Amino acid sequence: MKDDSAAPYVRGGEWVWVDPDEPAEPGRLVAAWADAAESVTIVRLMVVDGELRVLRAPDGGLPDIAVTRDNETMIRGVVVFVGRSV
């Protein structure tokens, strides 16, 4: 497994822009539905063992979620910008 220390992340209070048409590639931040359909969580898409796609929280505070054909629609889009208000 690759080193996550330089992985992108979102700090508390920052805003994100999500593109639903951008491909969810390894190492990209994605917006994905959490357990409750009305909430969204930002996680990072990773590849483990070359074939298994896994959603992993950047801070490691949530369990990994394997992405399969059955739950692939939980990925809402790719984060294309992170910023904060001034």
Image (cartoon, helix red, strand yellow):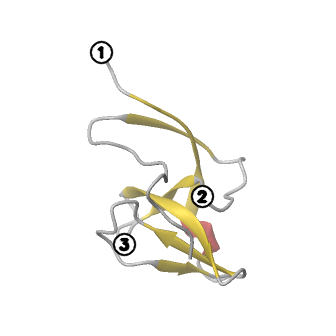
The C terminus is located in which quarter?
Answer: top left
Q: To which quarter of the image does residue 40 belong?
A: bottom left
Point out the tag, 2 or 3, that comes first from the N-terminus.
2
Instruction: Say few, some or many: other residues with alpha carbon within 10 Å of mark 3 (under 14 / 14 to 19 / 20 or more).
Output: few
Point out the tag, 2 or 1, that comes first from the N-terminus.
2
The N terminus is located in which quarter?
Answer: bottom right
Q: Dot 2 lies on which element?
A: loop
C-alpha gap between disc 2 and disc 1: 28 Å
Point out the tag, 1 or 3, that comes first from the N-terminus.
3
Q: Nearer the viewer, mark 1 or mark 3?
A: 1
Residue under numbered circle 2: 27
Instruction: Say few, some or many: other residues with alpha carbon within 10 Å of mark 2 (under 14 / 14 to 19 / 20 or more).
Output: some
* Left or right: where 22 falls relative to 16: right
Q: Which mark is residue 86?
A: 1
Residue 66 on image: x %, y %: 54, 81
Instruction: Point out the residue furthest to the top here.
Output: 86
C-alpha gap between disc 1 and disc 3: 32 Å
Q: Amino acid at mark 2?
A: Gly
Q: Amino acid at mark 3?
A: Asp
Contact between marks 1 and 3 (CB within 8 A): the answer is no
Q: Residue at x 36, y 72 (%)?
A: 35
Q: To which quarter of the image does residue 59 belong?
A: bottom left
Residue 18 on image: x %, y %: 56, 42
Comparing 65 with 5, the one in front is 5
Residue 22 on image: x %, y %: 71, 47
Q: Amino acid at mark 1?
A: Val
Q: Which mark is residue 35?
A: 3
C-alpha gap between disc 2 and disc 3: 22 Å
